[in-house]
Amino acid sequence: NAIAKISDSLNLSFADYVKVAGIKEFGYKSLASIEPITTVTGVAGYETTWTPQATASASLPITYFEIPSDKTATVEVFLNKKEDLDIYQQMLSSFKLTQ
């Protein structure tokens, strides 16, 4: 999904935005982990997990990709079920942006 950046964060670099996106967009408490990734097609992004407000365990991953032609939005890929982690990782490795 292409998600519009929160308006008060438009001036942040992509790398800095990713570090606060889960807090600003979804109300998470804090960033639990962040790992840079590069797909086989050369698209760079960040795989993140977040600490929810109510629990101490980290969220399932959200991976962010920058849209080179649109600095006001990001592509965000969510893992919805832990048992689909292998499929999620395979999908991310082959992700490609087309314009």
Image (cartoon, helix red, strand yellow):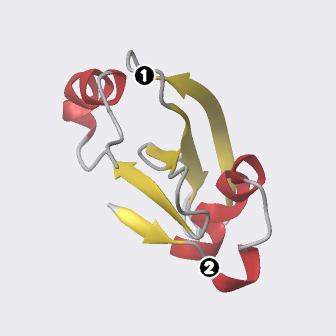
Foreground pick, 64 / 34: 64
Q: Is residue 63 left or right of residue 20?
A: left
In the image, residue 20 lies at what x, y percent? 70, 61
In the image, residue 97 lies at what x, y percent? 36, 41
The reply to whether discs 2 and 1 touch (Cβ–Cβ < 8 Å) is no
In the image, residue 39 lies at what x, y percent? 42, 22
Q: Is residue 90 left or right of residue 61?
A: left
In the image, residue 34 lies at what x, y percent? 65, 36
Q: Earlier in the sequence, mark 2 or mark 1?
A: 2
Foreground pick, 42 / 46: 42
Q: Label 2 amino acid?
A: Ile
Would you identify the image quadrant in which residue 44 lies?
top right
Quadrant (top left/top right/bottom left/bottom right) for the N terminus: bottom left
Q: Residues within 10 Å of mark 2 (few under 14, many from 20)?
A: few
Say above or below: 90 vs 88: above
Q: Which residue is mark 1?
A: 39
Foreground pick, 58 / 2: 2
Q: Is residue 36 left or right of residue 9?
A: left
**Residue shown at 56%/62% (left/top)?**
52
Q: Secondary structure at mark 1?
A: loop
Q: Label 1 amino acid?
A: Thr
**Residue shown at 52%/56% (left/top)?**
69
How many angstroms separate mark 2 from mark 1 (CA)?
26 Å
**Residue shown at 55%/69% (left/top)?**
54
**Residue shown at 47%/21% (left/top)?**
42
Q: Residues within 10 Å of mark 1 (few under 14, many from 20)?
A: some
Q: Secondary structure at mark 2?
A: loop
Looking at the image, which residue sits at the far top? 40
Residue 81 is marked as none
Q: Is residue 88 left or right of residue 61?
A: left
Say above or below: 66 vs 86: below
Residue 6 is marked as 2
